[in-house]
Image (spheres, rainbow, N blue to C red):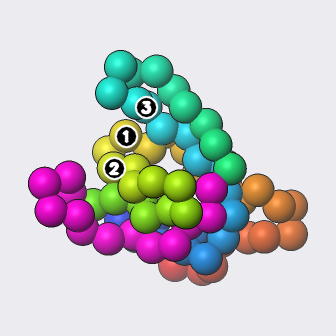
Amino acid sequence: MSFHEARQYVGLECMVAWRDRRGEVQERKLFIVDVSFVPLYGICLITDYMEIRLDRVVSIRPAEEGALPAAA
């Protein structure tokens, strides 16, 4: 996932799937606060739960039917 793709979900509650350090896919409903550069990790999704490296994100989809990502 690219930085610009991820930015469209900032401010939304989304179902985020990512690969953990063992390579297993984890999925959780998260509120995406920001997409930012974190030293030593690179570009990350900043959420209300944790930071997730963008290169580990498998998919993001809005949690609510009416919530659509902003136009890029």
Callouts 3 and 1 close, C-beta under 8 Å? yes
Q: Secondary structure at mark 1?
A: helix
Q: Is residue 38 magenta?
A: yes
Local packing at callout 1 (Cα closer than 10 Å; few below 14, some 14-19, many 20+) is: some
Q: Position of residue 21 (x, y in %)?
A: 33, 27
Quadrant of the image occupied by residue 36? bottom left
Label of residue 56 in the image: 1
Looking at the image, which residue sits at the far front?
49
Q: Secondary structure at mark 3?
A: strand
SS state under label 2: strand
Judging by the rendered image, the residue that carries numbered circle 2 is 53
Q: Nearer the viewer, residue 17 or 28?
A: 28
Magenta-highlighted residues: 30-42
The residue carrying pointer 2 sits among few (fewer than 14), some (14 to 19) or many (20 or more) residues within 10 Å by Cα, namely many
Local packing at callout 3 (Cα closer than 10 Å; few below 14, some 14-19, many 20+) is: some
Amino acid type shown at disc 3: Arg
- The one of 41 and 8 positioned closer to us in this rendering: 41
What residue is drawn where x is 55% and y is 31%? 26
